[in-house]
Image (tube, helix red, strand yellow):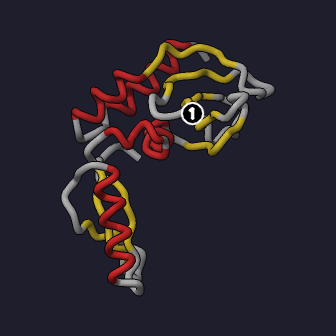
């Protein structure tokens, strides 16, 4: 694996995003892929540094798990692995880096587990405030905060 190959993996995913604001923001916080010591046996590459936390997104071809090469890593020693993901964008939308984007909306979760959007996209804090209001006023309903940015999954 090389830095160029990893950058190409990310670029291929970015071409699948429906919202150009998301693409521009991700590109603004990407770093040149470089090998970092996350305490893994195999080389891991830092690709994004989250401006809102100490969490980074890393690519580790063998170290997280072969099916989940993208990881959120952080903590005091930067050796805590939070999760592994199959795609870079899955890791991005699970990181705090994504809260800067006005793409968050409230979804009502139906009994069959489908999610129906009930607000327009907006700020993270406003979406969560609305989720808490709805959960309080409708305790039998199920409400979540999420995004509806389309990308290749």
The residue sitting at 71% across, 37% down in the picture is: 80
The residue sitting at 52% across, 23% down in the picture is: 47
Q: What is the tally of numbered marks visible in this picture?
A: 1
- Residue 10 location, quadrant: top left
Check the picture and name the quadrant holding the N terminus.
top right
Q: Position of residue 28 (x, y in %)?
A: 35, 21
Instruction: Check the image and report above or below for 82 versus 59.
Output: below
Instruction: Check the image and report above or below for 80 versus 139.
Output: above
Instruction: Check the image and report above or below for 19 versus 28.
Output: below
Residue farthest to the bottom, as pictured:
140
Residue farthest to the right, as pictured:
41
The residue sitting at 75% across, 24% down in the picture is: 42
Q: Position of residue 8 (x, y in %)?
A: 44, 20
Task: Give the labeled residue for mark 1.
Answer: 55
Which is nearer the eye, 22 or 64?
22
The residue sitting at 34% across, 38% down in the picture is: 100
Q: Secondary structure at mark 1?
A: loop
Is 85 left or right of 126, judged from the image as shown? right
Which is nearer the eye, 95 or 1?
95
Q: Position of residue 103 (x, y in %)?
A: 27, 48
- Residue 107 location, quadrant: bottom left
Q: Residues within 10 Å of mark 1 (few under 14, many from 20)?
A: many
Is 112 left or right of 76, judged from the image as shown? left
Which is nearer the eye, 11 or 130?
130
């Amino acid at each position: 694996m090389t830095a160029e190959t990893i950058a190409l993996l990310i670029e291929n995913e970015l071409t699948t995003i429906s919202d150009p604001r998301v693409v521009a923001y991700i590109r603004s916080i990407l770093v040149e892929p470089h090998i970092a010591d996350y305490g893994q046996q195999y080389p891991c590459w830092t690709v994004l540094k989250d401006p809102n936390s100490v969490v980074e997104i890393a690519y580790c071809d063998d170290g997280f798990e072969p099916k989940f090469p993208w990881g959120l890593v952080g903590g005091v020693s930067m050796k805590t692995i939070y999760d592994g993901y199959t795609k870079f964008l899955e890791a991005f939308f699970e990181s705090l880096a994504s809260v800067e984007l006005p793409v968050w909306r409230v979804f009502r979760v139906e009994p069959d587990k489908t999610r129906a959007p009930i607000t327009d996209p907006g700020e993270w804090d406003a979406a969560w405030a609305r989720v808490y209001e709805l959960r309080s006023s409708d305790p039998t309903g199920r409400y979540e905060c999420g995004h509806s940015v389309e990308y290749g999954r």
